[in-house]
Image (tube, rainbow, N blue to C red):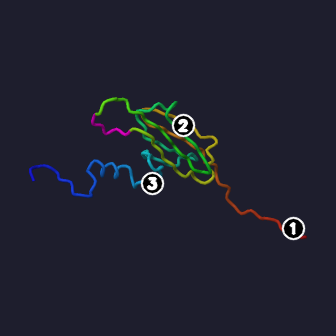
Amino acid sequence: MSGMIERLPGWPALPDLFGWVEGGLPAAHTVPGTHGIRIEEHLEEGTYVLRAELPGIDPAKDVEITVTEGLLTLRAERAAETTGKHHTEFRYGTFTRSVRLPAGATGDDATAEYKDGVLTIEVPVPEEKAGTRTIPVRHG
């Protein structure tokens, strides 16, 4: 070998392999045919905080955040800006990510802010009422 990396038949090219490793398992938390979104999430003083890496988008036009039955779904689109065929490592198209909200969080009072390519979503999580509830039995 003269300094060249040879690809074995049936094996993905290295850039494809690295993209797969960076993006996680295929189809994990994403919709088939879309790209995943890198996120950080944590619970902070009664608030669920999700930070999503979304550089190069217009949040007013290209981002949709929905909550359905405790599942928060983030969807974004990035259009290609060039018309010619050039080498690019940027990803264009539709990006999605879904996460399960903590118990009790409905998303009704959620807020979202976009700054420096990072979307931050905050969802209040109500305190769970501890204790036991007694259910009376009626005599019929």
Q: Which residues are magenta?
A: 86-91
Residue 89 painted magenta? yes
Of callouts 3 and 2, the N-terminal one: 3
Specify the principal SS of the magenta part.
Answer: loop
Q: CA distance from mark 2 to mark 1?
A: 48 Å
Furthest residue toward bottom: 139
Separation of residues labelled 3 and 2 (CA atoms): 23 Å
Residue placed under numbered mark 3 in the picture: 28
Number of numbered discs visible in the structure rendering = 3
Residue in front for this viewpoint, 112 or 2: 2
Could you tell me which quadrant the C terminus lies in? bottom right
Could you tell me the amino acid type at mark 3? Ala
Q: Position of residue 110 (x, y in %)?
A: 59, 40
State which tag comes first along the sequence, 2 or 1. Answer: 2
- Mark 1: few, some, or many residues within 10 Å (few <14, many ≥20)? few
- State which mark lies toward you, 1 or 3: 3
Q: CA distance from mark 1 to mark 3?
A: 49 Å
- Residue type marked 1: Arg
Q: Secondary structure at mark 3?
A: loop
Q: Circle 2: is it few (<14), some (14-19), or many (20+) Cα within 10 Å?
A: some
Label 3 crowd (10 A; few <14 / some 14-19 / many >=20): few
- Circle 2: element type: strand
Q: Which disc number belongs to residue 96?
A: none
Residue in the picture at 51% in, 36% down: 63
In this image, 53 relative to 47: left or right?
A: left
The three-letter amino acid code for the residue at tag 2 is Ala
Q: What residue is shown with label 2?
A: 112
Q: Position of residue 60 (x, y in %)?
A: 52, 30
Residue 131 location, quadrant: bottom right
Residue plotted at (79% across, 65% down): 135
**Which disc is residue 138 wearing?**
1
